Amino acid sequence: MKNYSLTLCLEINNTSYIFFVTQNDDKNNFKIVYSLETPLIGIENNRITDLEKIFDVIKKNVYIAEQKLNCTFKEVVLILDNFNPSFVNLTGYKKLNGSQILRENITYILNTLKSCVDETELKKTVLHIFNSKFSLDNKKIKNLPIGLFGDFYSHELSFTLINTNDYKNLKQIFDKSNLKIKKILLKSFILGVYLSDDNPDIDTFFHIEIRENNSKIIFFENNSLKFSQEFNFGSNIIIKDISKITALEKNVVKEILNNNDFNDSSTNEEIINKEIFRDSSNRKIKKKIIYEIILARVEEISNIIIFKNINLKHYLNSGKVMFFQLNDKLQFKSLSEVYKNIFSINTNIDLKFLNEMPDDIKLSKVNKLVHYGWEKEAIPIAQSKKSVITRLFEAIFG
């Protein structure tokens, strides 16, 4: 008879709470055995505004899951898709003068950098720490270089943080629900792990996601999360502008975009199918006009998110691959082509389009991170077979 364990996961995103329960057996087989999505309440503009409403949602839906699966949950894994994370990248140095790099040298660097973050980011709580870069005698090296001889060693760490008050509020809610927070994972981190695993030859990349009402960019360097930023606009600004300029209702604009092909080869002679204008069969709109509005807004979106984003100016030359995701019911055929044209003009980054990460893949990565850690995490999750890095960082941080 197989033994198995159940893990409760809760994703909090911009629109909903999603409760998942995953099952692992003693042969490391993994599957989702329960899922339920319910509308987001008690959180506005990425900040907790009503503790009781959130508590009621969690209490009710955890109880439903427990009754269905005939179990009791004591822990929860949180997946956060918002809460405005911040990022700090620091580098520590050690003069070696021809001696070996010792574990104590690494310990000193890590303790020093962690203390710097604790002392300067007083209102933030660290969620993730990544070993982003190692360099020995000004040459980059891939793995932690304990035992190697050299003259000068540098070690860069990347810290991911959230507002401490948000963390305290979350902890308060789950304490009241008799649930211990086992692990908090940013969805951006999970997505980066998924893309890294799926593209083993690519360890540095951008990912842009355009939704209907918001957008997000993340940057992964050397398989480490270095940056993410969310924007309060998406494809809705394209629809809004077309509606304003053409005096058409937004639902009509969506229908036009979903049923017509717009590209730079459109001519002034091409007319939108008149059947779309139910109230006025004599109405005519040229495709070229619609295309020019789309082009202007896509260029604006791209500039704000990446090309003229001052937060990314140090990273633009590092990432050669851009994974691009259009998560919206507005999937008109030529939108991807418009983005390709904009990117080909502004950069030599390789643009790769992909679909939304499926729930089973997302949860398999969560399972991996919770039980086995990530190779670039400076504080890996405890596991049965502990690596040198795991033992080292457990000794440092407990």
Image (cartoon, grey):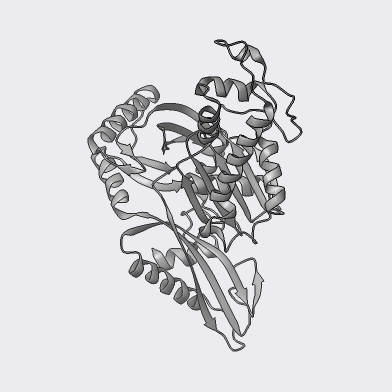
Judge by depth and name the residue closer to the eye, 2 or 145. 145
Image position of 99 with respect to 182: above or below? below
Image position of 163 with respect to 134: above or below? above
Image position of 136 with respect to 182: above or below? below
- Residue 262 placement (x, y as % from top left): 69, 30
Judge by depth and name the residue closer to the eye, 281 or 339. 281
Judge by depth and name the residue closer to the eye, 109 or 65. 109
- Residue 111 placement (x, y as % from top left): 41, 72
Q: Residue at x 54, y 30 (%)?
A: 245
Judge by depth and name the residue closer to the eye, 105 or 158. 158
Q: Is residue 52 left or right of residue 308?
A: left
For the C terminus, the quadrant is bottom left
The residue most toward the bottom is 97
Q: Residue at x 62, y 66 (%)?
A: 143
Residue 128: which quarter of the image?
Answer: bottom left
Q: Is residue 321 visible?
A: yes
- Residue 270 placement (x, y as % from top left): 73, 24
Q: Is residue 386 visible?
A: no
